[in-house]
Image (cartoon, coloured by chain):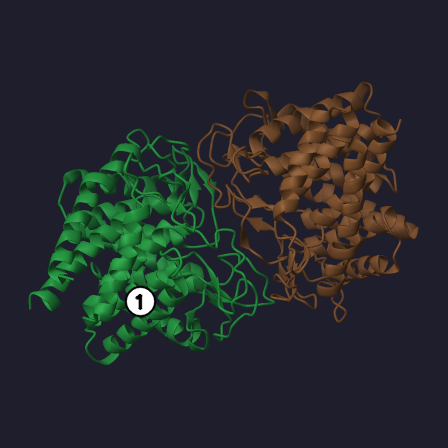
Chain colours: A brown, B green
Amino acid sequence: MDTEKYLTEWREHYRHDLLDDILPFWLNHGLDKVNGGVYTCVDREGKLMDGTKSVWFQGRCPFVYSFAYNNIDRRPEYLAMAKNCIDFIEAHCIDPTDGRMYFEVTADGRPLRKRRYVFSECFAAIAMAEYSKATGDRSYAEKALKLFKEIVRFISTPGILEPKYLPTQPAIGHSITMILINTASRIREVIPDPELDRQIDNSLELIRTKFMHPEFKALLEMVTPEGELIDTINGRVINPGHCIETAWFLLEEAHYRGWDEGKGKEIKEMALQILDWSWEWGWDEEFGGIINFRDCKGFPAQDYSQDMKFWWPQTEAVIATLYAYLATGDTKYLEMHRMANDWTYEFLPDPVYGEWFGYLHRDGSVAQPAKGNLFKGPFHVPRMLIKSQMLIDEILAVHVRK
Amino acid sequence: MDTEKYLTEWREHYRHDLLDDILPFWLNHGLDKVNGGVYTCVDREGKLMDGTKSVWFQGRCPFVYSFAYNNIDRRPEYLAMAKNCIDFIEAHCIDPTDGRMYFEVTADGRPLRKRRYVFSECFAAIAMAEYSKATGDRSYAEKALKLFKEIVRFISTPGILEPKYLPTQPAIGHSITMILINTASRIREVIPDPELDRQIDNSLELIRTKFMHPEFKALLEMVTPEGELIDTINGRVINPGHCIETAWFLLEEAHYRGWDEGKGKEIKEMALQILDWSWEWGWDEEFGGIINFRDCKGFPAQDYSQDMKFWWPQTEAVIATLYAYLATGDTKYLEMHRMANDWTYEFLPDPVYGEWFGYLHRDGSVAQPAKGNLFKGPFHVPRMLIKSQMLIDEILAVHVRK
């Protein structure tokens, strides 16, 4: 394979998909010019099927449009989209009684549901950080940092977030641990603070010592506070796409620290280990693609969607394999990229109405064709398209044209 | 079709499946002789994959074994299974601080999770009522009635059950409305009380005036307190299996009141309307079977399992169609029974390890083969096998051999 040709062609493909398909789709069908904010519950054609606004997406969307602005194309409409969502968050998505954010609000911003997690806050924080970088307006960096400190307070102060489970079986979760790495590192890019570094170090240590389980060659989703397996259906869950996402968050951190030696090298090796393990669990030898869930002891996974192929694990695999190739120059990762990318492009893009399908059966056939809901919208696909272009530029400079 | 032959053969088939397969399976693989109670998280072979106990099943299981004892075969091990689970409920599944029940407990009965619903309490109440009938021990009937009054207090006292959604969009739910009909009517059989009748009347009225929506020919899962459509993804959900279950709960109530005239006839007609509508939405013309979810405006349903075939909607369809035939003598319902029953028997029973699969793809292929989890165990399948035998006996007496 001609690596330079392969990578150059795909960089162009990603650029075209981002600028001519994905970003315009949500500007046309998502942007709410009346109330502000962004809609995501749209059907295959982009027609609004529910005006409920996902608070996750009021943060994810401005992150993505700012990220595209900062790295791909400085179009003013991207900044306007970002500002529009951030304004909506500040006006409507924060509970004034305690500073925590909602999960769903109505089209015009009245609160519908608040959950016991801080993901809304994490997405809002990375949006503000990226928007600060795009505009040079430091006040948004400061808001992002302030929000981050609130997040840490919410999760570390007993009594603020009501736990889902009673104290009988204490557990810690991979989700919050990994997202705080990404949240802190995005904010650190615009406003350094020791609390950000501390959180990243804490999360890395938790992943290394508690969530990584070499006896299963797996990164688990929940474990006891001591890092032991909880031997139940939920405790044995492997979410390969999620682990692959963590792998590239770690590669990003390793890269930042310099991955050829010391702590950076350690983090890189941990990331590659997680990627290799998770690919082994997640890649479907029979139909291709990254499968939703596995059980680390081989029992049947009980999530109803366990054998489906969702869009986002595929996009994480595309990013993570490029990152791993950049980190190592090992062509095995380029081959894994080709496998993940080929599968993604065979089944996910909608050739008729644009944007990508999200919910496929195991064999790649479309289970239901809506382009968005409270969990799918302008985030994983455009993030993959942006990040992959950036990675290819770096790969070409480091490994191919050197 | 020779109706008598068809029904007689299926009655024998149901009897055999119940007594020689389903009930023994859970006595062998579910009954916990060490701690009491019943396990349900078992794999295809019946091997325990999670010791967590579903509180729903600590009530559903003794209901089913008592129901079999009362109506099919008075085997002492059925009573012992029932007593074992009811004792476990009383010892471990009730929160002493407020009298509400848990959702999950550990194998030895320590509380893991409590949810904001009263389904655990409803299943415990029908278990106690049916066990009282089986043993003649009136104290369990009294306990069932007391628990019912607690349930009504929990759901009608503001502040006891924390709502999932904020007050912005008030909603009422079909689930609790329909289950209270069944709960109250099971208890009424052993201990009459005006509060039971009042609840049944209230639920019937809510279903008729709020949840039934002729403009969609559908019974909706949630509506505004005024009965209006909530025009969102969740508000437009049709769960055909759930509606078909409601249809036979209503036929049961109509039968009890005498369905040939007056209020009984009204309820019967309402039930048949719901069954006809829901069959129309739920029956999969392409692959057969009752599908999981539809959207009443035809948007893509967003539940991940929307196009799957779960075991329990099929079992509800088998019961409801027999009930409708009993109520009407209309052979259209006998034909619907044949369709539902043929599909059920083609895809659900496991010919190798016994019991039935629960989670099928749209085409009937097995998505994952476990025999149980927190939501599947000894309930829908044996209830269908018991109830269908009872209905066939009555049909043979009323319509066939008259």
Q: Residues within 10 Å of mark 1 (few under 14, many from 20)?
A: some
* Whether residue A177 can be seen here: no
Q: Which residue occupies the extreme bottom position in the image?
A: B262
Instruction: State the quadrant of the N terminus of chain B.
Output: bottom left
Where A12 falls versus B274 (above or below)? above
Q: Residue B193: give x, y in percent of width and height.
A: 25, 65
**Which of the chains bears the disc numbered 1?**
B
Q: In which image quadrant can residue B336 be found? A: bottom left
Q: Residue at x 35, y 52 (%)?
A: B312
In the foreground, A52 or B214: B214
The residue sitting at the top extreme is A262
Determine whether, in the image, residue B42 is placed left or right of residue A82: left
Q: Is residue A236 visible?
A: yes
Residue farthest to the left, as pictured: B402
Please indicate whether residue A98 sits to the left or right of residue A373 in the image: right
State the residue at coordinates (84%, 29%): A400
Q: Is residue B278 above or below residue A134?
A: below
Query: Looking at the figure, which quarter contains the C terminus of chain B?
Result: bottom left
User: What's the amino acid at mark 1?
Assistant: Glu
Q: Residue at x 35, y 50 (%)?
A: B311
In the figure, residue B276 lies in which quadrant? bottom left
The spot of residue A170 in percent (x, y) is: 55, 34
Quarter of the image for residue A79 reads bottom right
Please provide percent x and percent y for residue B389.
17, 54
Left or right of residue A64: residue A356: left
Location of residue A54 in the rendering, given as x and y in whole percent from the top left corner: 66, 57
Write down the residue under mark 1. Answer: B195
- In the displayed structure, would residue A29 be above or below residue A136? below
**Relative side of A25 to A288, left or right:** right
